[in-house]
Amino acid sequence: MKISNYIGFSLIILGVIIFLLGVSTYFWEPVSAHVLYKNEYRTVQNGYNGLQGFHSHPYKGGDPLLWQSIGYSYIVNGQEYTSKLIGFKLPFNNQLPKFGPGKTAYYFPGFPSLSVLLRGPDYRIYGAFISIGLSILLIRNWVKSCLEQYA
């Protein structure tokens, strides 16, 4: 049972760290960036329909996911850096800049090779880690109380 405590607390701590990293980007230095490439892929659900055969359609209940990757370069203190990091965010359904120069990236002042295009935390990441960690702890405590009650 102790291992579930460690896993639960570790996931919660990881979620808090990811949240704090995302918030810290608001204090990073802006720099002019040049977007080198931008790729987007729509995710569809494939399936077999007995009447129409094999087909593809968006996931039920909404639009397909738009998976994204991007590469950009920027110069800090005369040295050029390249990065692929969108931000501390999941790589889909983000508002990314278009190709070309004149975009803004944000770099960590103490480590200029670490940069992001989008500032802020992504609730989809830190929320998932914290929710799963809390769920593990709650289920562990519920199982423990059940075992103590019937033992």
Image: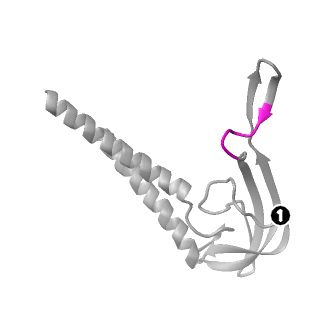
Magenta segment includes 57 = yes
In the image shown, does 65 or 31 lie closer to the viewer?
A: 65
Q: Identify the residue shown where x is 48% and y is 67%.
A: 20
Relative placement, left or right, of 101 versus 19 is right
Q: For the N terminus, which image quadrant?
A: top left
Total numbered badges shown on the rendered structure: 1
Residue 38 visible in the picture? yes
The relative height of residue 119 versus residue 76 in the rendered view (above or below) is above
* Residue 92 relative to residue 128: left or right: right
78 above or below 44?
Answer: below
**Coloring basis for residues:** one colour
Residue 58: x, y in percent? 74, 40
Q: Which residues are magenta?
A: 56-62
What's the residue type where badge 1 is placed?
A: Leu
Categorize mark 1 by other alpha carbons within 10 Å: few (<14), some (14-19), many (20+). some
**Residue at x-position 64% and y-position 73%:** 107
Residue at point 26% right, 41% down? Answer: 141
- Asked whether residue 73 is drawn in magenta, I would say no
- Quarter of the figure with the C terminus: top left
Residue plotted at (55% across, 64% down): 121
Judging by the rendered image, the residue that carries numbered circle 1 is 36
Residue 134 lies, in percent from the top left, at 37, 49
Q: Quadrant of residue 138?
A: top left
